[in-house]
Amino acid sequence: MELAARIRKIPDFPKPGILFYDISTLLIDPAAWRETIGRLAEAARAFRPEVLAAIESRGFLLAAPLALELGVGFVMVRKVGKLPGTVVSHSYDLEYGSDTLQLADGLIRRGSRALVVDDLIATGGTAAASVELLRKVGAEVVGALFLIELEGLEGLARLPVPGRSILRFPA
Ligand code: AMP
């Protein structure tokens, strides 16, 4: 099945000059979504993860069915102020300014093999920050998995862990 054709491309969103890759047109098609999760599961198994760490918010959509398919748990890497209880934070630099990601403290067993999951990797900044956050709570980050990789930005090469993607598109 041609999964790449199921991804909708929206020019100038959320700002001029950005070509947005929208997975809504994949989610609405159950056969294509089933195939997507199957292909992600095959790639994920090679990392032998014990827990998936999904990046807000589209990473959650991938990681929830993927975790069930693999028989592992998943944790949410969230933006500031969304998680209840004690959290661990990690701030990282953006082109202009900075951003912060958070994870519940004490949720992941120390030494767990964690796999970062998101819908798309562009520069790799968000995923790299997620790796640092997971390391802060004592996880062993074994890799990162994305449905889409934007070519030419070298996002996977910038990660401190091995990364894989299923589909590749121009940035
Ligand atoms: P980056 O940190 O540059 O790798 O950006 C990755 C994050 O931003 C992911 O959570 C993506 O969902 C989102 N993102 C970045 N660029 C795009 C794009 N062109 N289309 C859709 N989502 C994007």
Image: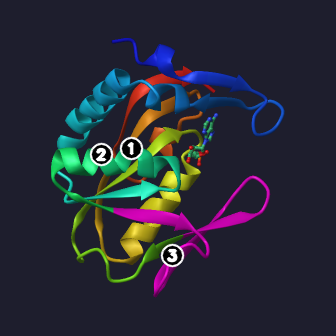
Q: Is mark 3 within 8 Å of ligand 1?
A: no
- Residue pointed to by mark 3: 83
Q: Position of residue 66 (x, y in %)?
A: 28, 45
Q: Quadrant of the N terminus?
A: top left
Q: Gap between marks 1 and 2, in whole Å?
A: 6 Å
Q: Which mark is residue 65?
A: 2
C-beta proximity under 8 Å, tags 1 and 2: yes
Q: Is residue 11 toward the left or the right of residue 139 in the image? A: right
Residues 153 and 116: in front is 116
- Residue at image coords 25%, 35%: 43
Name the secondary structure under disc 1.
helix
Circle 3 packing at 10 Å, graded few (<14), some (14-19), many (20+), is some
Residue type indicated by callout 3: Leu
Q: Which of disc 3 and disc 2 is earlier in sequence?
A: 2
Label 1 vs 3, first from the N-terminus: 1
- Picture coordinates of residue 61, whole percent (x, y): 43, 46
Residue 62 — which label? Answer: 1
Q: Which residues are magenta?
A: 75-101
Q: Residues within 10 Å of mark 1 (few under 14, many from 20)?
A: many
Left or right of 126 in this view: 33: left
